[in-house]
């Protein structure tokens, strides 16, 4: 059995010996036939789902046409998403939409109408037809909820797909359950299946009571939601109420628990309410392992990443021979696709081999096989012959062997009374660090008032006590989900007009929200609480200040309640301005910087298909994301002639050159070219040879097992430099980190002069396969930095180098100076909402520290070259960080342009920062700002942030 379950060291097994009688076999024999009831439902005049589907598919086609998609435009998902500005997160939904339309063949007929110039009239006719027939359908009453829900979603579809509004705002307007509640109750189909489930439950209880007339039952419902199943089950349980010890109503969302407590609590005193995530191990959640006689899961297990994991966690709740009752979908229909299919959770599943194609449901035979594999017995399908209504009821018993993820070694424990609980390690609590300085500032009162206000607001929303709300604990740990966020936002807007729901998505704790409100809503706070405002200087937290702003003891001097900066930024350190005296580089469709500048100036998109001399992209290409060994994109930014190299020029043997990573060869060439550009030979760059070499690199796919260190050391060895020689891998910031380390080397005297740069080549399809497996890449050929429809970055190649020298020395040597580096800073994003998710707060702080360190007033800046990779999440976060930093220095607006070279050439990864610096230097040289591309329509998430001080660089 262990072999079949494929147990690994992260799994633990427990055998639950708290047994209850096995009675499901006798229950199955007593289940009646439901054919007559199902036939009655289908024959009702109101059951017109087929008629509705036909009209919905026509309207769906028409809505896609309003987004610029014709019948032919639906064949290539990547091109369609890009053309229509559809967010990449809706790719799976869109591909299944194409399947629906191909089956219905509506897209072809609508296309013909469009070509006849009657398209607008046709869509209006379709909506008119909908308005007429929906009145007829609504007369039956029970279809009204479905009509309202699907119409709301379909009318808002273009805005949803482009990311302008959230689907939850449409399905749950103002956090209300009203639109979805009727889907799962008070309609004949849903009620029929819920009553069948209740029939099985009562038959089970009857059989148990025959064994023990005094038996008590503990029931847990997983993902109870609005209570569609719960209401019927609890009503049917009324004759057995004295035998119900507990009915545990669980859900992921606290909003549903609050709804249940209000709707059902007064009538059913045995109800309890708990947050529970069936996708996670039971250990550590507030429910009892092996403590329940019956577990009900209605329309929930399919909505998990992994059905097997969900079944294991469900089984862990049951006693041995405990009853599992499932109500699950068994088909893929258009109504569900157009409503719940728009939610992210619909497409989270990772076990597609088990699922119905195009949706997360499972066919009955797959449920049977999976339940058997996971140790469930006596599996029965009470209404197997009436599944054409779209659902199935499944009953099974647990064999008592429970499999749970554990940090401990695998062991089987036996206990006569109960299974031994596997205790999850307690999560380390993050304590709120109160800066010592804050207690001495008069603004502390305002901050504390705001903290108290938000704690009360959160407590009121989740129906808890404010004393139980910790200011530094992520709000999601209190069950704050997208529905409750809407409620919080609506309450906040009563005092703060400009607050949007993105506030709670961007910031995780009350402390961070307080800081945002103090930064952006101080006047409203003062009005609300009637206390004095913070002085501008009081915004500086002691622990956030650069070391250069503290005295020799590390403290900040105070006079009264005013913060006095006694030491100017940079003072006390031998900081020198550093000149850039030489520059070289090669980038997509540019063999040199002259061609690079021409491409930038003319606004060219330098993205192309994977060249044939790399690999045949067709062998690995598949539009379906997530397929192992495939990539969903064929686009990138590529250099030419990367295999060309003159080894004898550098006194390298041809055989050794063949073993060298092409990245090593190219960087050696560009390092030499940058020295020439500076007007020197390698020997003349430094009298004593103290030239440092710093190169950013992050990818190595060359067959000879290339080494990063060798890229820097090859330059130092070949050109006889004895300064530091360092290869840097900090991912996308590698080349900028290389520049920072080069500056540090010049400041410390380790180098008299330095070469800093980066290199990135895409030499093997494994490079694309790895990035595709993480869904990082765009499927199209446009990097839409800051633009609507941004769906990921386009991978690219690049190589470049700078020659750096202290400014004073460069002036004495009469060097040509491209630009002066005033300062640089490094930090990390710490722990955020995800490993690859940046922190706008720390990005902002890094900029502020850089401005202070360099002694630069940001209001004097006219251009910012941004990271701007073209991701829906990263771009708004970067803009948010920039605005936070600029907002600390005056209220002027729209004085600083922003751009991203990635819109021209893609994301050069470890050479990306160097490409951006090069672009800035060339713009300064030519006194021209070049355009950023593909952002004619700004990312709606950036619109919500508002480009208060920045404007996208465009051609005049």
Image (cartoon, rainbow, N blue to C red):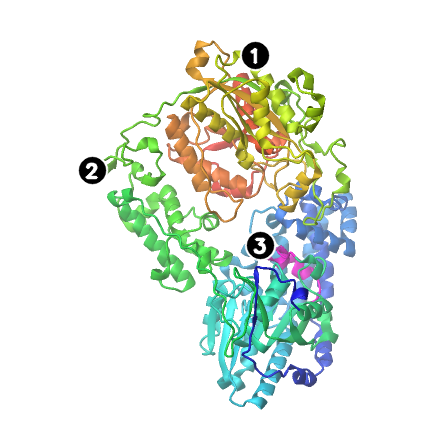
Report crowding for label 2: few under 14, some 14 to 19, many 20 or more residues within 10 A (C-alpha): few
What's the magenta region? 330-350
Q: Is residue 67 left or right of residue 854?
A: right
Q: Is residue 884 in view?
A: no
Q: Secondary structure at mark 1?
A: loop
The percent coordinates of residue 910 (x first, y second) are 57, 32
Q: Residue at x 66, y 28 (%)?
A: 660
Q: Which mark is residue 167?
A: 3
Relative to 454, is 546 above or below? above
The earlier-in-sequence mark between 1 and 2 is: 2
Q: Which mark is residue 560?
A: 2
Viewer-side residue, 817 vs 698:
698
**C-beta proximity under 8 Å, tags 3 and 1:** no
Q: Secondary structure at mark 2?
A: loop
Q: Nearer the viewer, mark 1 or mark 2?
A: 1
Viewer-side residue, 127 vs 475:
475
The earlier-in-sequence mark between 3 and 1 is: 3
The percent coordinates of residue 730 (x first, y second) are 53, 36
Q: Residue at x 31, y 44 (%)?
A: 435
**C-beta proximity under 8 Å, tags 2 and 3:** no
Report crowding for label 1: few under 14, some 14 to 19, many 20 or more residues within 10 A (C-alpha): some
Report crowding for label 3: few under 14, some 14 to 19, many 20 or more residues within 10 A (C-alpha): many
Q: Residue at x 55, y 25 (%)?
A: 757
Q: Nearer the viewer, mark 3 or mark 1?
A: 1
The earlier-in-sequence mark between 2 and 3 is: 3
Q: CA distance from mark 2 to mark 3?
A: 52 Å
Residue tagged by mark 1? Answer: 681
Viewer-side residue, 322 vs 355:
322
């Amino acid at each position: 059995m262990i072999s079949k379950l494929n147990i690994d060291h992260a799994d633990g097994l427990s055998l639950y010996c708290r047994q209850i009688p096995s009675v499901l076999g006798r229950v199955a024999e007593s289940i009646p036939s439901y054919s007559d009831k199902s036939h009655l439902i289908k024959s009702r005049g109101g059951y017109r789902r087929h008629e509705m589907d036909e009209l919905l598919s026509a309207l769906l086609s028409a809505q896609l046409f309003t987004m610029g998609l014709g019948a032919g435009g639906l064949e290539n998902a990547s091109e369609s998403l890009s053309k229509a500005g559809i967010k990449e997160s809706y790719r799976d939904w869109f591909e299944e939409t194409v399947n629906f339309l191909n089956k219905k063949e509506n897209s072809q007929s609508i296309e013909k109408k469009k070509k006849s110039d009657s398209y607008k009239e046709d869509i209006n006719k379709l909506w008119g037809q909908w308005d007429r027939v929906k009145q007829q359908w609504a007369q039956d009453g029970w279809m009204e909820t479905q009509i309202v829900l699907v119409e709301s979603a379909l009318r808002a579809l273009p805005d949803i797909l482009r990311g302008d509004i959230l689907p939850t705002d449409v399905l749950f307007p103002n956090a209300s359950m009203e639109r979805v509640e009727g889907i799962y109750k008070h309609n004949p189909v849903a009620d029929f299946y819920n009553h069948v489930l209740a029939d099985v439950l009562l038959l089970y209880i009857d059989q148990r009571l025959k064994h023990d007339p005094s038996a008590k039952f503990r029931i847990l419902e997983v993902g109870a939601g609005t209570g569609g199943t719960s209401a019927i089950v609890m009503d049917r349980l009324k004759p057995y109420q004295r035998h119900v010890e507990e009915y545990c109503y669980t859900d992921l969302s606290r909003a549903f628990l609050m709804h249940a407590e209000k709707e059902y609590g007064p009538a059913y005193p045995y109800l309890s309410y708990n947050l529970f995530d069936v996708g996670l191990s039971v250990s550590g959640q507030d429910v009892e392992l092996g403590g329940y006689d019956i577990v009900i899961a209605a329309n929930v297990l399919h909505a998990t990443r992994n059905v097997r994991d969900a079944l294991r966690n469900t089984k862990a709740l049951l006693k041995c021979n405990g009853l599992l009752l499932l109500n699950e979908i068994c088909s893929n229909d258009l109504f569900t696709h157009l409503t719940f299919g728009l939610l992210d959770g619909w497409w989270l599943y990772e076990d597609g081999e088990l699922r119905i194609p195009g949706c997360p449901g499972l066919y009955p035979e797959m449920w049977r096989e999976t339940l058997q594999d996971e140790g469930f017995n006596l599996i029965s399908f009470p209404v197997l012959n009436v599944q054409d209504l779209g659902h199935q009821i499944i009953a099974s018993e647990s064999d008592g062997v429970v499999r749970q993820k554990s940090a401990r070694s695998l062991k089987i424990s036996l206990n006569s009374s109960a299974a031994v609980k596997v205790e999850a390690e307690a999560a380390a609590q993050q304590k709120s660090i109160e800066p010592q300085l804050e207690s001495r500032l008069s603004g502390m009162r305002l901050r504390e008032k705001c903290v108290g206000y938000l704690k009360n607001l959160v407590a009121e929303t989740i129906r808890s006590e404010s004393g139980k709300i910790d200011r530094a604990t992520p709000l999601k740990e209190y069950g704050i989900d997208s529905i409750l966020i809407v409620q919080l936002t609506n309450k906040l807007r009563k005092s703060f007009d400009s607050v949007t729901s993105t506030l709670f998505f961007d910031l995780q704790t009350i402390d961070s929200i307080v800081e945002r409100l103090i930064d952006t809503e101080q006047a409203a706070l003062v009005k609300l609480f009637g206390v004095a405002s913070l002085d501008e200087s009081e915004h500086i937290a002691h622990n956030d200040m650069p070391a250069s702003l503290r005295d020799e003891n590390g403290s900040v001097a105070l006079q009264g309640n005013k913060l006095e900066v006694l030491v100017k930024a940079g003072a006390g350190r031998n900081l020198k301005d550093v000149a850039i005296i030489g520059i070289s580089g090669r980038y997509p469709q540019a063999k040199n910087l002259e061609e690079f500048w021409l491409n930038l100036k003319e606004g060219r998109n330098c993205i192309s298909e994977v060249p044939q001399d790399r690999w045949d992209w067709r062998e690995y290409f598949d539009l379906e994301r997530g397929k192992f060994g495939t990539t969903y994109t064929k686009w990138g930014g590529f250099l030419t002639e990367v295999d060309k190299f003159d080894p004898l020029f550098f006194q390298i043997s041809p055989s050794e050159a063949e073993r060298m990573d092409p990245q090593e060869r190219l960087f050696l060439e560009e390092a030499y070219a940058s020295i020439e550009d500076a007007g020197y030979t390698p020997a003349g760059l430094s009298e004593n040879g103290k030239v440092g070499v710093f190169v950013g690199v992050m990818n190595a796919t060359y067959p000879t097992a290339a080494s990063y260190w060798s890229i820097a050391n090859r330059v130092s060895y070949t050109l006889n430099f004895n300064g530091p020689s360092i290869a840097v891998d900090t991912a996308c910031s590698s080349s900028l980190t290389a520049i920072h380390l080069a500056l540090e080397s010049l400041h410390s005297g380790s180098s008299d002069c330095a070469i800093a740069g980066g290199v990135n080549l895409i030499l093997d399809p494994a490079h694309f396969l790895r990035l595709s497996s993480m869904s990082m890449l765009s499927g199209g050929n446009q990097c839409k930095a800051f633009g609507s429809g941004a769906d990921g970055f386009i991978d690219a190649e690049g190589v470049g180098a700078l020659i750096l020298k202290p400014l004073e020395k460069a002036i004495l040597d009469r060097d040509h100076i491209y630009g002066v580096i005033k300062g640089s800073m490094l930090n990390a994003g710490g722990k955020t909402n995800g490993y690859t998710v940046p922190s706008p707060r720390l990005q902002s702080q890094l900029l502020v520290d850089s401005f202070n360190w360099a002694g630069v007033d940001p209001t004097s800046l006219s251009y910012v070259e941004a990271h701007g990779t073209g991701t829906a999440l990263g771009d708004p976060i970067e803009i948010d960080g920039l605005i936070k930093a600029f907002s600390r220095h005056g209220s002027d607006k729209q004085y600083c342009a922003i751009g991203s070279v990635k819109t021209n050439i893609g994301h050069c990864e470890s050479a990306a920062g160097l490409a951006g610096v090069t672009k800035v230097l060339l713009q300064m040289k030519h006194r021209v700002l070049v355009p950023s591309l593909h952002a004619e329509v700004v990312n709606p998430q950036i619109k919500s942030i508002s480009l208060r001080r920045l404007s996208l660089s465009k051609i005049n």
